[in-house]
């Protein structure tokens, strides 16, 4: 798999890879054992580690996950809603992510 290879991906490659995973009708899924969700989480973590999280990447992941799954992926310190409980625009969420997740985009 990608996580074991020496393959170097850029933000556009991660975007395409995540879009391919999300082509399945399985997502979003409430089941944490859904193969597509497991693959999405694995690729997203690698993307974070590589500092390649872009607005497109975050939107793909957000659209393919439930709110609780997204919170688990981005961490509980990242705000997903405003004070009134309204979901934040993805661009606003991007600025709340750890800086090292977006450093290479």
Image: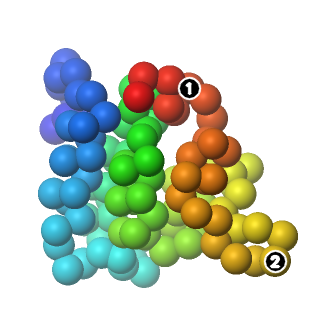
Check disc 1 and report the residue beneath it.
100
Q: Residues within 10 Å of mark 2 (few under 14, many from 20)?
A: few
Horizontal and vertical percent for residue 35? 25, 65
Q: Residues within 10 Å of mark 1 (few under 14, many from 20)?
A: few
Residue 6: x and y in percent read 19, 19
Q: What distance separates the C-alpha of mark 2 from that of mark 1?
A: 29 Å
Q: Residue at x 41, y 28 (%)?
A: 105
Q: Is residue 72 visible?
A: no
> To which quarter of the image does residue 53 belong?
top left
Name the front one of labels 2 and 1: 2
Which residue in the structure is indicated by mark 2? 84
Q: Position of residue 33 (x, y in %)?
A: 35, 69
- Left or right: 57 as drawn, with respect to 67: left
- Where residue 83 sits in the image (x, y, percent)? 84, 70
- Residue at the image point whose x is 71% and y is 57% from the top: 79
Task: Indicate the secondary structure of the residue bearing disc 2.
Answer: loop
Instruction: From the viewer's perspective, tell me whether residue 6 is left or right of residue 77.
Output: left
For marks 2 and 1 on the same chain, the one whose residue lies earlier in the sequence:
2
Residue occupying the point 22% across, 21% down: 8
Q: Is residue 97 left or right of residue 64?
A: right
Where is 84 relative to 58, above or below? below
């Amino acid at each position: 798999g990608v996580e074991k290879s020496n393959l170097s991906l850029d933000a556009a490659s991660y975007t395409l890879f995540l879009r391919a995973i999300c082509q399945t009708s399985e997502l979003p899924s409430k089941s944490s054992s859904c193969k597509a969700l497991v693959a999405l989480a694995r690729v997203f973590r690698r993307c974070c580690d590589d500092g390649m999280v872009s607005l497109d990447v975050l939107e793909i992941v957000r659209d393919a996950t439930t709110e609780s799954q997204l919170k688990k992926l981005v961490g509980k310190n990242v705000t997903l809603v405003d004070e009134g409980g309204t979901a934040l625009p993805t661009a606003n969420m991007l600025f709340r992510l750890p800086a090292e997740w977006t450093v290479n985009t």
